[in-house]
Amino acid sequence: MDMADAIERFRQSLPESVRERLDFSPESLNVIEALVLGEYSSPEQLQKHGDVALIDGMARYVGQVFRQHFGGKWFIDYGDPKRAFYGLPQLRDMAGRRTQQCPITLVTASADRRTGKFIKTVFDGYQERAVADAQNQVFWRQNE
């Protein structure tokens, strides 16, 4: 419910030179990753000493980029504490995906991978899958 306002607060906390590059395009995911790499030397540092508002803002932004391009809905699963993403915001029902995605784990994993393009690479994989699934649906409809 607070998503748009929370993302705007996050954007306003950033320097203008960064903020102007956050346009919800797939390429803007590299801007987020550059923020992660510039602020944190490891996922452990991000988790221990990270600014909760900054990390939350980055995860929300990443999730909204994925959501705007692949659809889906935000949810938090409190069903089973043994699940990997228990209690964390996730996206489900995205085009080309059968499983949910947890944007905060993309942010933390990018601190570990340190490529500068990890999140965008995941996005590109989703896009390839979504295109392939759409082509398969067309094929099956034409051949029914």
Image (tube, grey):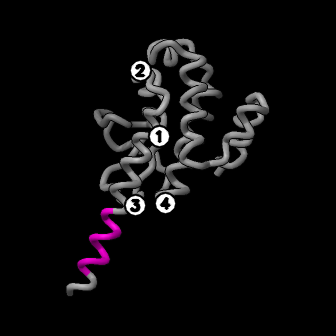
Q: CA distance from mark 3 to mark 4?
A: 6 Å
The amino acid type, in three-letter code, at marker 1 is Lys
Whichever of labels 3 and 4 marks the residue nearer the N terminus, that label is: 4
Residue type, numbered disc 3: Ala
Q: Quadrant of residue 131?
A: bottom left
Cα separation, mark 2 vs mark 4, equals: 27 Å
Q: Position of residue 75 (x, y in %)?
A: 47, 49
User: What is the CA distance from the residue labelled 2 to the residue labelled 1?
Assistant: 15 Å
Q: For marks 2 and 3, give the CA distance.
A: 27 Å
Mark 1 closeness class: few <14, some 14–19, many ≥20 residues within 10 Å: many
Q: Quadrant of the C terminus?
A: bottom left
Circle nearer the N terminus (4, 1): 4
Q: Amino acid at mark 2?
A: Asp
Q: Where does the image place residue 42, in percent across and percent down from the top left?
A: 46, 14
Q: Which residue is mark 4?
A: 71
Residues under labels 4 and 1: Cα distance? Answer: 17 Å
Question: What's the magenta bit mostly, secondary-structure-wise?
Answer: helix
Labelled disc at residue 95: 3
Q: Earlier in the sequence, mark 2 or mark 4?
A: 4
Instruction: Give the distance between the C-alpha atoms of the residues marked 3 and 1, in whole angstroms.
Output: 16 Å
Region rendered in magenta: 132-140
* Kind of element beneath mark 3: loop
Q: Is residue 105 left or right of residue 34?
A: left
Q: Earlier in the sequence, mark 2 or mark 3?
A: 3
Q: Does 63 appear above or below 32?
A: below
- List x then y, in percent, for residue 121: 41, 40
